[in-house]
Image: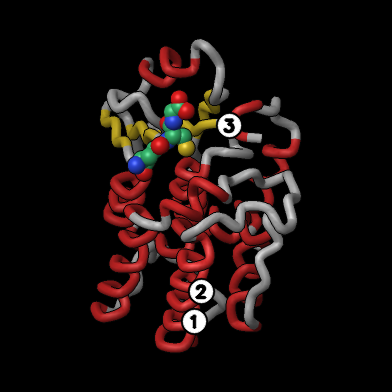
Amino acid sequence: MPQLTLVVGTKNYSSWSLRPYLALAQTGQPFQEVVIQLGEPDTTGKILQHSPSGRVPLLKHGDLSIWDSLAICEYLAETFPEARLWPQDKTARAVARSVTSEMHSSFAALRQHMSMNIRSRKPGQGRAPGVAEDIARITAIWNDCRARFGQGGPFLFGHFTIADAFYAPVVTRFVTYDVALDAVCAAYRDAVLALPAFQKWAEAAKHEKPVARYE
Ligand SMILES: N[C@@H](CCC(=O)N[C@@H](CS)C(=O)NCC(=O)O)C(=O)O
């Protein structure tokens, strides 16, 4: 098996990087990691040494480079089917792809005003126009998935899937900004926070250099 290397941004802030990291950890495959510090004068140059898009994350598998969080997760699902990164059932898989794509393309207000900052606590901040609507939509998605597909475990589709990887940065935002959740969403949040791979990422994030523009 060719070497797997995941290139990510500063873990405390790089929400897009956290997603494929969790999916890759779920495969159980050994991998190397390159962490690029965001917000430095040479950040773009360093990212461009790996990624043609000038953005992280990027996955290298031997000679192959794959960029964009969703493309990486799709590649992992195809390469390691035993990890069940998508639900087995076609209907559940279609919904999992829908909610994942919605996360990939939407929730601009939440992303802008509640940016990911795993180690920080900012209760009450970030309540800008549009944020409450994004939170309402996300919590509706979580409730719907848990009710319809969540019987086999604590995640959106029971066992851990790419949909959970995509919503994990939202989980951390809800902790950072102290967003009140109903019982179903609070239990789901806690299941994501308890993932060993998430805990490892969050522990590393505690020790990183702060980046003023993301604080
Ligand atoms: N759509 C891309 C977004 C990637 C993205 O925006 N990454 C940010 C970090 S989270 C980045 O590389 N920013 C470049 C920089 O800060 O210089 C994906 O899903 O991977």
Give the residue at x 35% y 24%.
54
Q: Is residue 28 visible?
A: no
Asked if the beta carbon under badge 2 is closer than 8 A to the nearest atom of ligand 1, the reply is: no
Q: Is residue 85 above or below residue 72?
A: below
Q: Is residue 96 visible?
A: yes
Q: Secondary structure at mark 1?
A: helix
Mark 1 to mark 3 CA distance (whole Å): 31 Å
Mark 2, mark 3: which one is toward the viewer? 2
Residue at horizontal 58%, vertical 46%? 116
State the SS at label 3: loop
For label 2, the SS is helix
Q: Position of residue 118 (x, y in %)?
A: 66, 46
Pick the front one: 155 or 107: 107
Which residue was labeled with disc 1? 143
- Is 88 on the left or on the right of 26, as rendered? left
Q: Residues within 10 Å of mark 3 (few under 14, many from 20)?
A: many
Residue under pointer 2: 139
Q: Is mark 1 within 8 Å of ligand 1?
A: no
State the CA–CA distance, disc 2 to disc 3. Answer: 27 Å
Residue drawn 51% across the image and 27% down it: 34
Amino acid at circle 2: Thr
Q: Quadrant of residue 124?
A: bottom right
For badge 1, the amino acid type reads Asn
Specify few, some or many for label 2: CA neighbours under 10 Å numbering under 14, 14-19, or 20 or more: some
Amino acid found under the numbered disc labelled 3: Thr
Which of the colour schemes (rainbow, by chain, secondary structure, one colour) is used?
secondary structure
Residue 51: give x, y in percent of width and height: 34, 25
Which residue is under mark 3? 10
Q: Which callout, 1 or 3, points to the residue nearer the camera? A: 1
Q: Is residue 35 above or below residue 189?
A: above
